[in-house]
Amino acid sequence: MHKIRTGDEVIVIAGRDKGRRGKLLKILDDKKNPKRGQRVIVEGLNMLTKHIKPNSQREQEGRIGKVEGALHVSNIALYNPMTHKADRVGIKSLEDGRKVRYFKSNGEIVDVLES
């Protein structure tokens, strides 16, 4: 059970894009090298330059494009729209047994998790 999930609005708390927000597109998990840790891709952040070769079979010209690079999961936090800041997330159970994610600063419920 992850505290940050795809589709969440996150804010960067460290690095060159510090303070910028975006939607979490993908969570990458490096199983071969666990010391590298979990990395995430955020829409429109950590843009890298990629050289694309021409491909005559696809009728594609060569170009220099921009792609989103991966960020370490420790450098992002969930964005709290109530406080307009980064916030820590906790998981708790309700009286009826459902688990929910909530913001630790104000106790506001983010969403209900599926079991």
Image (spheres, rainbow, N blue to C red):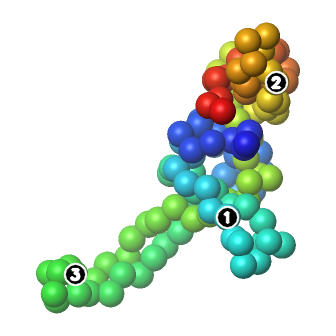
Amino acid at pointer 2: Lys
Q: Residue beneath label 2, please?
A: 92
Question: At 31% across and 78% down in the image, what residue appears?
Answer: 63
Q: Are marks 3 and 1 in contact (CB under 8 Å)?
A: no
Question: At 14% across and 81% down in the image, what residue appears?
Answer: 59
In this view, the residue in front, 69 or 28, is 28
Q: Does any portion of residue 90 appear in the rendered image? A: yes
Q: Residues within 10 Å of mark 2 (few under 14, many from 20)?
A: few
Check residue 61 in the rendering and tell me which mark sits there, or answer none.
Answer: 3
Give the position of the C terminus as an image quadrant: top right
Q: Is residue 42 left or right of residue 91?
A: left
Cα distance, mark 2 to mark 3? 52 Å
Cα distance, mark 1 to mark 2? 25 Å
Residue 82, given in percent of the width and then of the height, sits at 69, 16
Q: Does any portion of residue 11 appear in the rendered image? A: no
Which comes before the other along the chain, label 2 or label 3? 3
Mark 2 falls on what kind of element? strand
In this view, the residue in front, 68 or 91, is 91
Which comes before the other along the chain, label 3 or label 1? 1
Residue 98 is drawn in which quadrant? top right
Residue 27, given in percent of the width and then of the height, sits at 61, 56
Q: Residues within 10 Å of mark 1 (few under 14, many from 20)?
A: few
In this view, the residue in front, 65 or 35, is 35
Cα distance, mark 3 to mark 1? 33 Å
Amino acid at pointer 1: Asp
**Image height check: is 49 above or below 90?**
below
Q: Is residue 105 left or right of residue 41?
A: right
Residue 33, given in percent of the width and then of the height, sits at 76, 77
Question: At 45% across and 76% down in the image, what residue appears?
Answer: 50
Q: Residue beneath label 1, please?
A: 29
Question: At 78% across and 65% down in the image, what residue appears?
Answer: 37
Q: Closer to us: mark 3 or mark 1? A: 1
